[in-house]
Image (tube, helix red, strand yellow):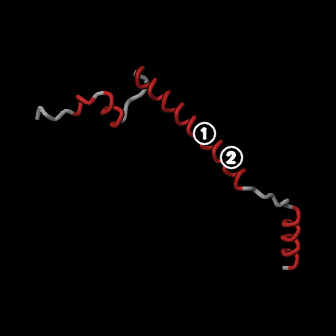
Amino acid sequence: MGAENESQEKRTQERPKSTLTQEQFLSWKRQKDAAVSANKAEVSRKRAEDIAAGAVQMNGRELFAHEPWVFDNSRY
């Protein structure tokens, strides 16, 4: 038990304690959110191009948005 306490004390002493201000966190969060939204926009743009080229199959929502006549039930 004594060795465990000593090793734990050494670990806590070795680690530098960094303080992160709220301003730093918010700056990091804005950058991360911007990167995530840019990535989503790029993926969405590529998906739209692939759908227009016929390279990928559309899901139900995309099919309804692009070809709503497929879901017309007025004939029945």
Residue found farthest to the left: 76
Secondary structure found at label 2 = helix
Question: Is 48 placed left or right of 20 in the picture?
Answer: left
Residue depicted at 52% across the width and 33% down the height: 41
Label 2 crowd bin: few (<14), some (14–19), many (20+), radius 10 Å: few
Residue 7 at what x, y percent from top left?
87, 70
| Mark 2 → mark 1, Cα distance in angstroms | 11 Å
Residue depicted at 45% across the width and 24% down the height: 50
Residue found farthest to the bottom: 1
Type of residue at label 2? Ser
Residue depicted at 66% across the width and 50% down the height: 26
Type of residue at label 1? Ala
Residue depicted at 33% across the width and 36% down the height: 60
**Which part of the image, by quadrant, shows the N terminus?**
bottom right
Position of residue 9 relative to residue 51, above or below, is below
**Which part of the image, by quadrant, shows the C terminus?**
top left
- In which quadrant of the rendered view does residue 51 lie? top left
Q: Disc number at residue 27? A: 2
Q: Mark 1 — residue?
A: 34
Question: Is 13 placed left or right of 28 in the picture?
Answer: right
* Front residue (pair 6, 16): 16
Q: Disc number at residue 45? A: none
